[in-house]
Amino acid sequence: SQQGEEDPQALSIQEGENATMNCSYKTSINNLQWYRQNSGRGLVHLILIRSNEREKHSGRLRVTLDTSKKSSSLLITASRAADTASYFCATPTSGGNKLTFGGGTRVLVKP
Amino acid sequence: DTEVTQTPKHLVMGMTNKKSLKCEQHMGHRAMYWYKQKAKKPPELMFVYSYEKLSINESVPSRFSPECPNSSLLNLHLHALQPEDSALYLCASSQADLLALSYNEQFFGPGTRLTVL
């Protein structure tokens, strides 16, 4: 079973708009990670937020974490066509070395 | 070098063939992983090696056999696969701190697209 569930499953926006996706998880965590995957390729780590952090920024990315609601969000600001990809949240379990991925959000940024 | 490499990029094999997937990293990471990913699905963990020892096997069928010859290499030996095993196979690595049970972000290779006929 998936530790994280993401919504929406798919998102289509115009270039320049912001994209927001959400992730919910079930058990307690010490960190939550976000990854991007371009079509048919490997995943790229975007950002890691620890359980004692509420918000983190990296370039045009903003991640929030609410441990009381067991949820996280990823915001991509001023999107570009190159942001078209699938985005996955992931949480480590079983002592930390097992990473369980959410179902992913497929983002399409139209030029 | 912050790259994880995987060979081959594509592999087509029959159900009676034996083949191997290879993965290499030179980042000094002591945890390495195999994932299987079907189209439009998230990656599913298959195996974890920690300090060259198998630490997690997610009940993977024995027709998949992992091997970690040294801290930089990870292999996945394939034998008598089924068509439903066709998928993208991803290798990843990460730092591992056994004392703190801390595992950081994972670095993924580009994957091997496997087709079983």
Image (tube, coloured by chain):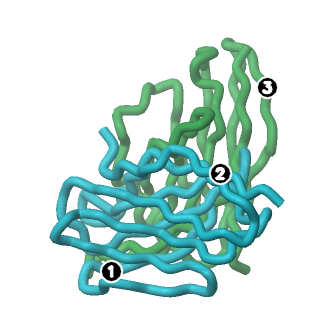
Label drawn at residue A50: 1
Q: Secondary structure at mark 1?
A: strand
Left or right: where does residue B116 sit relative to residue B31?
A: right
Query: Are the residues under marks 2 and 1 on the same chain?
Result: yes
Q: Which chain is green?
A: B
**Residue B49, image x and y in percent?**
44, 57
Label drawn at residue A105: none
Label drawn at residue B12: 3
Left or right: where does residue B58 sit relative to residue A11?
A: left
* Quadrant where the image shows the C terminus of chain A: bottom right
The residue at the point 58 percent across, 33 percent down is: B38
Q: Which chain is cyan?
A: A
> Amino acid type of disc 1?
Arg
Q: Earlier in the sequence, mark 2 or mark 1?
A: 2
Q: Nearer the viewer, mark 2 or mark 3?
A: 2
Q: CA distance from mark 3 to mark 1?
A: 41 Å
Residues at discs 2 and 3 in contact (Cβ within 8 Å): no
Categorize mark 2 by other alpha carbons within 10 Å: few (<14), some (14-19), many (20+).
few
Left or right: where does residue A62 sit relative to residue B13?
A: left
> Amino acid type of disc 3?
Val
Q: Nearer the viewer, residue A98 or A38?
A: A38
Query: Are the residues under marks 2 and 3 on the same chain?
Result: no
Q: Nearer the viewer, mark 2 or mark 1?
A: 2
Disc 2: which chain?
A
Mark 2, residue position: A12
Q: Secondary structure at mark 2?
A: strand
